[in-house]
Amino acid sequence: MKNEMMFSDREIFKDSFNVFSQNYYSIRPGYPNKLYDDVKANITISSESTILEIGCGCATTIKKFAEFGCNLIGIETLDNIKDSINKVHNENSNISILQTTFEQYQSVQHGMDVIIGLTAFHWIQDTNKYEKVFELLSERGSFVLIWNSFLQSQSEATSQIDKLYTKYLYDVYPPGNNVNDKVLFKSDCCVKEILELTTFNVCFLKRYFSLFHYDKTTYPKLLSTYPKIGNIDLQRREAFLKEVADVVSKLKEISVPVMTTLIIARKKRRISNLLSSFSVTK
């Protein structure tokens, strides 16, 4: 049952992303600049290193990682952002972007130095996804996981919009749930999943908190990127977003707290590899 629900959620996410992909990159918050500094400080790379980024989207993040001075390979599957991806590829000689899934990806070189999984990594259904990351990494490779979690502020705008959720989306977002508790629990479960891996040691874990401000135009666009909202029927979605815009217009803006989680894990060396590293003398 859990796997069926996860598969359903993944399809909802993919459908929403395909329809509203441009909103994802023009409206959704990116990642804090300090995060990129922390990633660079906690991985081992050189100009000869290669980073694989899973779910590079319009390649906004991969351009930031390209500033590390190494080679990058991005994986993305969506057709409707191909032009944006090609533009980035043409402007950055150290970036290659492949249109494939992580499940289908086959490395043409031996041992990635770093593999970065953005928010999309959690939607990968392959139960062996961590094992595949392990196999793709070099012996001293690092696995970097990054995702944003949207929290809820305590404000008049939030209170009024909560009433609209009850009015229009009662079957999608049941009333009575504490949004922040639910978001934090889900994020903690993702962290716990990484901490319990037998193939990796977590060497760096940090959460960053940011506050983003939206107006009557940008906030409805942000909400349209939420998978469950993007998946409801057009008439109901448009009515909901129109009233949301009216509320934000009346109160001037709404603030959205965002929690960004960064985990850096190093590949554990297997016993067979450790034994082969010892020389036998007679």
Image: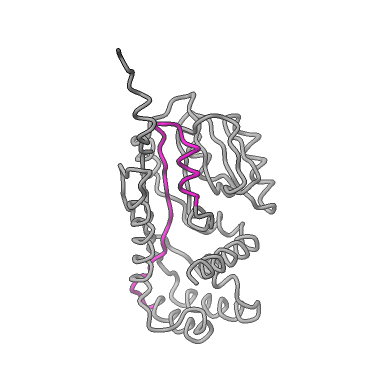
Find residue 279 and report its horizontal and vertical position in percent.
Answer: 33, 18
Find residue 6 and report its horizontal and vertical position in percent.
Answer: 51, 66
What kind of colouring is applied to the model shown? one colour
Find residue 146 and report its horizontal and vertical position in percent.
Answer: 42, 50
Name the residue rendered at 60%, 65% in the picture: 11
Residue 277 vs residue 2: left or right? left
Q: Residue furthest front?
A: 282
Name the residue rendered at 41%, 76% in the picture: 157
Q: Residue furthest top?
A: 282
Name the residue rendered at 34%, 66% in the picture: 185
| Span shown in magenta | 128-156
Of 46 and 243, nearer the camera is 46
Residue 130 is covered by the magenta coloring: yes
Residue 207 vs residue 47: left or right? left
- Please identify the quadrant where the C terminus is shown: top left
**In the picture shown, does residue 52 fall above or below 233?**
above
**In the picture shown, does residue 139 fall above or below 242?**
above
Of 71 and 63, nearer the camera is 71
Name the residue rendered at 49%, 84% in the picture: 170
Residue 218 visible = no
